[in-house]
Image (tube, coloured by chain):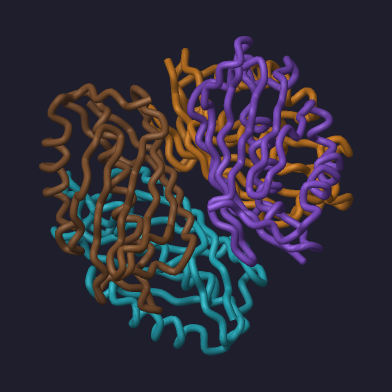
Chain colours: A purple, B orange, C cyan, D brown
Amino acid sequence: MPHQPRNPSFAEEIKQSFAKQTLMKLIGAELSRVKAGHIEITLPYRLDLAQQHGYLHAGIVTAIADSACGYAAYSLMPPESEVLSVEFKMNLLRPAKGKTFLAVAEVVKAGKTLTVVRADVFGVNQEGQRELIATMLGTMICLR
Amino acid sequence: MPHQPRNPSFAEEIKQSFAKQTLMKLIGAELSRVKAGHIEITLPYRLDLAQQHGYLHAGIVTAIADSACGYAAYSLMPPESEVLSVEFKMNLLRPAKGKTFLAVAEVVKAGKTLTVVRADVFGVNQEGQRELIATMLGTMICLR
Amino acid sequence: MPHQPRNPSFAEEIKQSFAKQTLMKLIGAELSRVKAGHIEITLPYRLDLAQQHGYLHAGIVTAIADSACGYAAYSLMPPESEVLSVEFKMNLLRPAKGKTFLAVAEVVKAGKTLTVVRADVFGVNQEGQRELIATMLGTMICLR
Amino acid sequence: MPHQPRNPSFAEEIKQSFAKQTLMKLIGAELSRVKAGHIEITLPYRLDLAQQHGYLHAGIVTAIADSACGYAAYSLMPPESEVLSVEFKMNLLRPAKGKTFLAVAEVVKAGKTLTVVRADVFGVNQEGQRELIATMLGTMICLR
């Protein structure tokens, strides 16, 4: 069942909001897909985003997953809304290795106040092969 | 009941490992306290670490909480161990406002393989007053 | 900082609501302490509440922790409210052994719409000694 | 990619283990599907399994989801293993209404020590229509 957006200009607003997330710029993340209830964010690996073994730091894996979840929820909210993260849970499945990383968020259930969202984060190698490295389940709130 | 470290040089090793986390350097985070089962990390607010409303991005709140949890777990592990985050859950309690941020992690239960850790993240204003902005509950694994 | 209840008859209402939770009766759980922002529930071990190794089933550990969290949140809500669980995360720290079990819930942050609550569950042996077996971090919502 | 079981008698062992979960008998839950990496548990609604509004108590929703997750993980473990729940996170999406309930667990990533599992719980009405009421993301550990 496809999601029905209630804000006709959601895609434009998400792009504008994403551009205001200074962290996304600092780390080099880009909004690569915007659909109703579905958001993708891409991040090239960089040496200055690592934990002690050189893998992408879990905080950065979380940052792109959380932004993707927030905008996936936002895409189904009515006009004049704001979205905030209430909570999320992240399972780190494999070492965060990759040439680039891709966070794919999908709304599980959109409610009036709360929206539950799931995101998968993939490490993508030189050949373009994806490996699931983390999965998030989170709750977003709609503020008017 | 105070925690008993099994690795006499845990504090030194944590400092060295933290210095290898390039992300901590990029964002300006510092290891401000290292005790057995207890770690604190401090982060000054910066305009380039924000989400769309100017608050500290949840991914950065998570980054310092996760690093603090990882090292709190590591401080009680035997020599020759490595620590990895298995999963964590974060509740974002208030907008992440502050002049600086402080993540305080404390081991809840140290096991042979898995260690459960809790972290609170505070926003600290100009006057030094702390306000709890987020709380994490996570699981770390010991690899030998 | 002690919590300030906004509903003068919260304790009475919690007792009445708890009495309507037929599951609590089925498993033999009792409300053993009711304070503003703090609830305790006690459960004697029974052979028919077990998982495959004879320990208390994680679902029952969760049931008493969740009810305790819900009422801890409710105790700080205004009159005419209802409480529902939004989500919770449970870490199972040790095998759920005990002659009785005690769930102790404490509000972390009470908000207008959402309240974040933490609960610890202890196994209590014949001598009355407590051992922490599980810890929950959850979010409750206030409906009017 | 279908999961490859390493224990040829996993289905038989899961049925035997489930039969030892006295809680499942008490609440009337049944193992309705056993495949490698995939478990389903069915539970008819009963008046004595409710919370204060008459819906299925979140602890019981969790009990069937957790058992399903545990056995889904177990189905991919080597012979002579035991499975324990490390942690889980549950989002309660809608009031737990239904004539029966169905928990469907699916392994996300099977590892040597830890296995990450997802479960959806559906309320099923008189006409057999399913509605998603809760979703779990959890971690199971393999003990030998």
Q: Quadrant of residue D105?
A: top left
- In this rendering, the answer to whether A85 lies above or below D1 is below
Above or below for C126 versus C31 = above
Left of A86 or right of it: where is C9? left
Q: Position of residue B116 (x, y in %)?
A: 46, 39
- Toward which corner of the image does residue C127 lie, by quadrant? bottom left
- The percent coordinates of residue B75 (x first, y second) are 53, 27
Give percent across and percent down for residue A96.
58, 22
Image quarter where the N terminus of chain C lies is bottom right
Q: Is residue C126 visible?
A: no
The quarter of the image holding the C terminus of chain C is bottom right
Q: Residue at x 16, y 35 (%)?
A: D11
Side of A136 where B100 appears, left or right: right
Compared across the picture, whether B134 is left or right of D137 comes to right
Left or right: A78 in relation to D102: right
Residue at x 54%, y 60% (from the top left corner)? C139
Q: Residue extending furthest top? A: A126
